[in-house]
Image: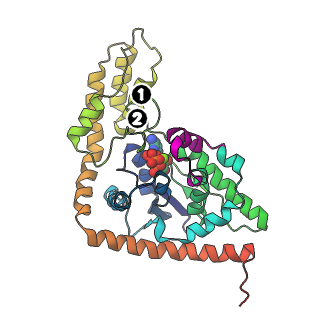
Amino acid sequence: MIKPIVVSGIRPTGYLHLGNYYGAVRNFLRMQEDYNCYFFIADIHSLTTHPTPENLQAGVKQVLAEYLACGIDPEKSTIFIQSDVPEVCELYTFLNMNAYLGELERTTSFKEKARKQPENVNAGLLTYPVLMAADIIIHKAEFVPVGKDQEQNLEMARKFAGRFNRMYKQEVFPIPRPFTFDGGDMIKVPGLDGSGKMGKSEGNGVFLYEDPKEIRKKVMRAVTDAGPTEPNSKKTEPVENLFTLLKIVSTPDVVDHFEKAYNSCEIRYGDLKKQLAEDIIAVTAPIRERILEILKDDAYLAQVARIGAEKARESAVRTLQEVKEVIGFKRLF
Ligand code: ATP
Ligand code: MG
């Protein structure tokens, strides 16, 4: 039986946080038995923020160890480093010819990044969705497990894949779809700072690698409000965010307990935070231990990366050959 293909990746711009885990990695873990999965470290994407060579290298190693520690299994999935598959840059160039300035400028992620780093609004940021589309369609992926923040970028990938097929009147690329853990909506893990998503560059991450003491400290410092004064009142955004996190990491009876306490105005945010911190630690502590172990084993990490690169290149080279034929690059000699 041919397994559907899945592609996803994370930028090595810092430690993996709960958003990366629940938005992307955990979906992926669920898929590796029944799908043909490619999971990569998006080191080319990370160049938009100009890391030093040392930071880039350390980031790649860290994320590779973290993937493995989370349970992505190199025997079942293809784990690779994006820059080990240079074919993706070639496809990116071709796709750029059919990606329009207006549509790229309109994407929220571009507008966000341009706002956050006004001194560095580079062309790579603008064409980020094009490279992301190339990452996905170079393996002819049908599914992409990503968080809500990537919804629009994935929509762009669908657009570019469809546009290429229509332009050359051939079904070269499947149109990739999002994949979520429970088949529901794409998930957005909030930060502890009151608003917005948890993100590496937001500086509000709770990291898988973090030690329990630090996690407790962070969670106890999370933004809340003065507390409900009327029964069943609407939650403010910071408190809603804490409940969202609780729903993600805790059991339904715990959530229920604090919902009831909130609705009857008896809630003590300190209790909620303590519970939340412990439930986060229950998820992260075993992963952290494995990360520490795996980071010690350079030979194993190198082997995983080498085998992954071979497998990913095989698939990428095949697609690229087909793409070049379709475009009309015929050999003259
Ligand atoms: P950066 O700030 O450098 O963009 P990031 O924290 O947003 O980092 P990415 O590498 O951009 O992480 O994203 C990797 C994956 O993690 C993507 O699939 C993305 O959808 C998912 N992801 C990131 N943050 C969240 C979040 N808060 N909730 C759900 N999914 C998330
Ligand atoms: Mg991001």
Q: Is residue 281 left or right of residue 78?
A: left
Using the image as rendered, state which of residue 246 and residue 152 is in the foreground: 152
Instruction: Tell me if residue 109 is in the magenta stretch.
Output: yes
Instruction: Tell me if residue 28 is in the magenta stretch.
Output: no
Mark 2 surroundings: few (<14), some (14-19) or many (≥20) residues within 10 A? many
Q: Which mark is residue 152?
A: none
Q: Is residue 73 left or right of residue 37?
A: left
For residue 19, above or below residue 319: above
**Could you say which quadrant of the image residue 220 lies in?**
top left
The region drawn magenta spans 106-124
Alpha carbon distance from label 1 to label 2: 7 Å
Q: Mark 2 — residue?
A: 191
Residue reaching furthest to the left: 213
Assess whether mark 2 and mark 1 are in contact (beta carbons under 8 angstroms).
yes
- Per the image, label 1 sits on a secondary structure element best described as loop
- Per the image, label 2 sits on a secondary structure element best described as loop
Q: Mark 1 — residue?
A: 194
Disc 2 residue: CB within 8 Å of ligand 1: yes
